[in-house]
Image (cartoon, grey):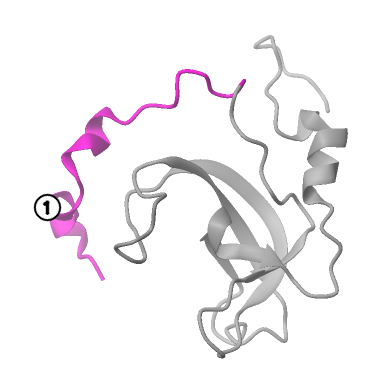
Amino acid sequence: MIHPTNIGDTLPQEIGTTTLPTDFPQNTPFPAFTLGDRVRWKPIDSDPTDFGTIIGFFYAYNLAADSPTENHLHHWHWKYLIFLDPTSESHSFCLADTAWENHLEYHEHTTPTGTERNRTHPEICQLPTSHAPTRL
């Protein structure tokens, strides 16, 4: 765990200059998953993985890699908030968790509908063209 007083020593210098991509949101890829999708973390070995329902997602800059070979380090990607299923391994001590898109997959017995929904209802991921509040 990083102690708050030492956090500045551990972050890369470019964090101060990180900005949204210049083509955001027009050329931002659609999220692979959307609200209500049932997902699980991709298994690393034979251990069971946590699973649950997506209750939120956001576009974020990935500063830390889980392994030295990950190719999404220092790039913008979708990150998801997952409400863990009551039968999930970690539910007894963690109700919700976050995960990068490439760490997730549809939970078995779940139809992959997220991409289809985003293509059918692109307003889920698009900002209004004016600054006036709009209802979706």
The spot of residue 16 in percent (x, y) is 23, 33
- Left or right for 19, reference 14: right
What residue is rendered at 60% in x and 71% in y? 41
**Vertical arrangement, residue 44 with respect to residue 10, above or below:** below
**Front-most of residues 83 and 30:** 30
Specify whether residue 17 is painted magenta.
yes
- Residue indicated by mark 1: 9
**Vertical arrangement, residue 6 with respect to residue 43, above or below:** above
**Vertical arrangement, residue 133 with respect to residue 116, above or below:** above
Res 9 seen here: yes
Q: Secondary structure at mark 1?
A: helix
What residue is rendered at 57% in x and 78% in y? 43
> In this figure, what is the number of numbered marks?
1
What residue is rendered at 15% in x and 57% in y? 5
The spot of residue 4 in percent (x, y) is 21, 59
- Left or right for 40, reference 14: right
The three-letter amino acid code for the residue at tag 1 is Asp
For the C terminus, give its image quadrant. Answer: top right
- Left or right for 98, reference 40: left
Residue located farthest toward the top when viewing the structure as drawn: 130
The spot of residue 113 in percent (x, y) is 84, 53
Res 100 seen here: no
What residue is rendered at 61% in x and 74% in y? 95
For the N terminus, give its image quadrant. Answer: bottom left
Magenta part of the chain: 1-26
**Vertical arrangement, residue 16 with respect to residue 81, above or below:** above
**Front-most of residues 75 and 52:** 75
The spot of residue 117 in percent (x, y) is 84, 43
- Few, some or many C-alpha atoms within 10 Å of disc 1 (few <14, some 14-19, many ≥20)? few
